[in-house]
Image (cartoon, rainbow, N blue to C red):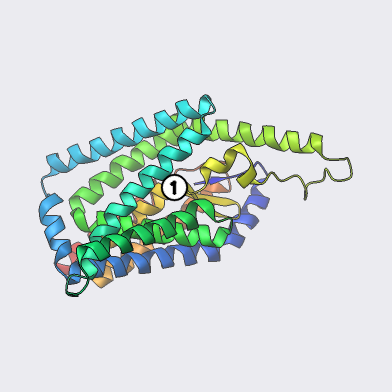
């Protein structure tokens, strides 16, 4: 989670507070979509089949899986950093869009197959066609459309589709270990790791483009309201689809995806677990936003994850 420029704490607080209703609405929308997608998988028993195939309660196995995910995340971030330092923006965008398309296509295929399981006249070819059309539509909303509301809507649907699948596939132990290890990695990467260096490089690019914009403008035009580089026309356009941008606040797509996975996992336990986990995530996000008023960059995963997981496990133990 990050803010885009330096200003005093009071200004930051006012700007972030003004975005709180939108952020809350976004999280609620994400949770509702996640719940619906998860219920769809569970209602046809596809969810149980997936969990039987990929889930485990063995702590050592789950820890190994979590370690693999963290290592893969680090390698991906390191590759992006290297490409960014070499100004290979087109390659970064191509890699990101293609990876999103492949993941979305597979996740949608599973969801659609589950949804249309009992409808005999819808065959595999028709499901494939629907999958392709929906995937391309979401990609257009996220990566092509210049409407910010359409971008956010597309990203919300995307993360809920993939997050609900992850939350269904993995057991509570797997989700817990994955989130704990990713949270630790998030703290590292934001303070000393690749993400911090990526943010520094992005800020340098933004400053350079803003400076070039000022130089090109006449003195009369070069005021604060006009000095804004259109990201769709700049080097920074490759970032589109990587963040939920709500005014002054940016949420990483990965953070939102794992919020969704945690909520999906809780919804399988019971509806009350879904509600308490959602509340835990919201409280964690509010705390993180407060920290963002004092720092330029704050890891978005640790506090919401710990609050959500605590609520999930307490509810699970109470329901036993």
Left or right placement of residue 214 versus residue 241 in this view:
right
- Residue 63 is situated, as x and y percent measured from the top left of the image, at 19, 40
Q: Residues within 10 Å of mark 1 (few under 14, many from 20)?
A: many
Q: Residue at x 30, y 46 (%)?
A: 179
Q: Is residue 190 visible?
A: yes
Q: Is residue 298 above or below residue 200?
A: below
Q: Is residue 266 visible?
A: no
Q: Quadrant of residue 229?
A: top right
**Quarter containing the C terminus:** bottom left
Q: Quadrant of residue 216?
A: top right
- Residue 274 is situated, as x and y percent measured from the top left of the image, at 29, 67
- Which residue is farthest front? 125
Q: Which residue is mark 1?
A: 300
- Residue 7 is situated, as x and y percent measured from the top left of the image, at 68, 44
Left or right placement of residue 74 versus residue 202 in this view:
left
Q: Residue at x 53, y 50 (%)?
A: 250
Q: Residue at x 60, y 52 (%)?
A: 248
Left or right placement of residue 15 versus residue 87 in this view:
right
- Which residue is farthest right? 220
- Residue 209 is situated, as x and y percent measured from the top left of the image, at 68, 35
Pick the residue in front: 236 or 257: 236
């Amino acid at each position: 989670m990050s803010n885009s420029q330096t200003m005093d704490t009071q200004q930051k607080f006012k700007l972030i507070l003004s975005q709180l209703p939108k952020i809350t609405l976004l999280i609620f929308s994400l949770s509702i979509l996640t719940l619906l997608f998860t219920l769809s998988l569970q209602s046809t028993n596809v969810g149980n089949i997936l969990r039987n195939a990929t889930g485990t309660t063995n702590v050592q196995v789950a820890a190994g899986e979590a370690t693999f995910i963290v290592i893969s995340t680090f390698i991906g971030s390191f590759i992006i950093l290297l490409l960014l330092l070499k100004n290979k923006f087109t390659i970064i965008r191509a890699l990101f869009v293609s990876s999103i398309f492949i993941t979305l296509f597979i996740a949608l295929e599973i969801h659609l197959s589950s949804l249309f399981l009992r409808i005999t006249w819808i065959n595999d070819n028709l499901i494939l066609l629907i999958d392709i059309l929906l995937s391309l539509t979401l990609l257009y909303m996220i990566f092509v459309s210049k409407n910010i509301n359409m971008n956010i809507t597309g990203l919300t649907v995307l993360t809920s589709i993939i997050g609900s699948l992850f939350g269904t596939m993995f057991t509570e132990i797997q989700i817990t270990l994955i989130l704990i290890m990713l949270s630790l990695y998030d703290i590292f990467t934001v303070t000393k790791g690749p993400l911090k260096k990526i943010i520094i490089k992005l800020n340098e690019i933004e400053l350079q483009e803003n400076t070039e914009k000022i130089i090109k403008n006449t003195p009369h035009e070069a005021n604060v309201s006009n000095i804004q580089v259109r990201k769709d026309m700049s080097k920074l356009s490759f970032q589109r689809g990587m963040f939920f941008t709500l005014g002054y606040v940016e949420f990483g797509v990965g953070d939102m995806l794992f919020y969704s996975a945690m909520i999906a996992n809780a919804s399988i336990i019971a509806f009350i677990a879904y509600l308490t986990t959602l509340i835990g995530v919201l409280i964690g996000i509010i705390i993180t936003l407060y920290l963002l008023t004092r720092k330029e960059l704050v890891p978005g995963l640790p506090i919401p994850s710990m609050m959500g997981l605590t609520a999930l496990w307490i509810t699970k133990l109470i329901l036993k």
